[in-house]
Amino acid sequence: MSEKKGQNFLHGAAIYTVGIILVKILGAVYKIPLGNILDDEGFAFFDITYKIYNFFLTIATAGLPVAMSRLISEADSLDRDNQVYRIFKVSTATFLALGAVGTAVMMLFPSEIASYMNKIQTTKSIFVMAPSVVLVCVTAAYRGYAQGHADMIPTTVSQVVETAVKVVVGLGAAGWLYKKGYSMEICVAGAILGTTVSSLAAMFYMMAAVHRKYPVKPPKEANDKPPSNKWVLSNLLRIGIPITISTSIMSVIQLMDAGITMSQLKNAAGYADQAAGVLYGVYGKAMTVYNVPSAFVVPFLSSIVPAVAAARMKQGPGEAANIAESAMRMCTLLCLPMAIGMAVLAEPCMKVLYPQAASQGALLLFELGITCYFMTMSLMTNSILPANGNERLPLISIVLGGVVKVVVTYVLVGNPNINIYGAPIGTLCCYIVMLGSNLYFMARHMARPVNIGRVVGRSGLSAVIMGIAAWAVWSLLHGLMGGVLTTVAGRELNVMLPLVAAVGTGVVVYCVLVIALRAITLEDMKLFPKGEKLAKKLHIH
């Protein structure tokens, strides 16, 4: 077996995680200054445009790349090169067609879409964003091909390239337009231009990387008979459509949620259009911080499908269940401390990242911090079930969670005493229902149920103690520096320095506890590149 084929899923995830860290650093360089260039209402335009874009993108790319990587992984594990090539060829044509439809709808009906979202000011941004859909669809085909070979490097590098270009073009365009005195909706369209240009750059990189690294056609000595186009398409759709429907429903619910939130703030809670836009904008800024931990789950989501699929084919359902539980454990290890840290340090985080944002941001981020872990684990289990051959089950979970979200958001946001704070409560209820449903389905349909104690226990204890320590350091230092009002780049030092100290303390405390409580074991470390050597240095047994 080649080294590439011998890679386990955490090797791929570890490679991808390094890239994600770089992407998140670049993303912070993009979104945080952008959030301060755009006022709260302008950021609402930006956030709504992205939700519309994600809806069309989800329809085109949510399930099919997963199906493609699964089919390629299964064929590649059996050395069927002709079948791999045929899957790639049919998949690429399918992605291109779906992406073209999404782009056409956004370009032909931008004002109608903007009107539905109660923000006609987003019309120009929607039009500028439209080409990104087809570009990302083509990129997704090439990423799925590489991931099906258990190779995360091209995907990782392409995402770094994509984010870097978006920072330069999007932030540069938004800043230049703002300085020239253009309206906020034009400034937002300039920021969105960065996404379109970066999508083009990522597509060109992925095409070049895949064609350089893998043969476009199978070698002459390949003697397996390629399946028909009809067979590939039918299997692609059989696996991909349930996943697409599941994820698309979530995108529809998010669009409805945005529309319901804006409508309820204005019609039921009694806010004027601009005031409602400000509230939704600061909610969007809090969501930017909330979404950071989910980025660390993406490497596992991209690696878990081919890994579980290949394990089921070659080693049986028991090993597939072991891989699924291992992925959930590592997800907890990474994301739970970030969620707790976000909640306990919500106020200083918002003051440092968005000093000009409305005051509601702190409590919104606190609520979202509580939600964050349930969200990341819902995403993980939504990928594990299809990888295990249960493509339709996440659809049930998402529908149940989505209905709960819409109902709770509608009721709470419409209450003037709760208003925008009801939106994250609806999100929390949604993901609790979704995760609970998925765990039930996994217990019924996998070789064995997930051991929640092994997944959460020691990591959870470490994360809780870390949160207490971080909050204590923040409170103590902020109290001692209460009279210091010196600012750096608009940030008050009596907020920024205690926050840095609290985060640093939290990281150190958590790392020490994880090792001391053996939340991560030698077997876990062996799954990472050179993990055994690192385990010896850290005295992990």
Image (tube, grey):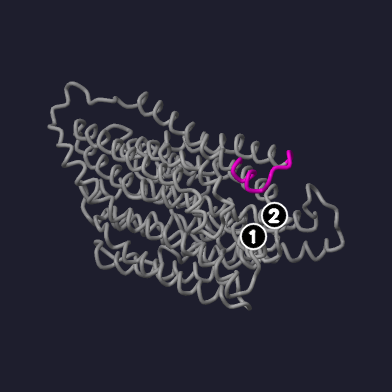
Q: Amino acid at mark 2?
A: Tyr
Residue name at image x 49 percent, y 67 percent: 427
Quick one: label 1, few (<14), some, or many (20+) residues within 10 Å?
Answer: many
> Label for residue 282?
1
- Tell me whether the residue at label 1 lies in contact with that at label 2, contact meaning CB atoms closer than 8 angstroms: yes
| Residue 22 spot, x, y in % from top left | 55, 40
Return the residue nearer the eye: 529 or 99.
99
Return the residue nearer the eye: 531 or 278.
278
Residue topped by disc 2: 354
Q: Main secondary structure of the magenta part?
A: helix
Return the residue nearer the eye: 70 or 402.
402
> Label for residue 374?
none
Q: Is 404 drawn above or below residue 22 in the view shown?
A: below
Quick one: label 2, few (<14), some, or many (20+) residues within 10 Å?
Answer: many
Residue name at image x 53 percent, y 71 percent: 425
| Residue 197 spot, x, y in % from top left | 52, 34
Q: From this viewpoint, is residue 189 visible?
A: yes
Q: Give the SS element for disc 2.
A: loop
In the image, 61: left or right of 444?
right
Residue name at image x 38 percent, y 40 percent: 137
| Residue 359 spot, x, y in % from top left | 71, 65
For the record, the magenta segment spans 179-190
Q: Quadrant of residue 4?
A: top left
Q: Amino acid at mark 1?
A: Val
Q: Give the mark nearest the N terminus, 1 or 2.
A: 1
- Where is the N terminus found, in terms of image quarters? top left
| Residue 469 spot, x, y in % from top left | 65, 64
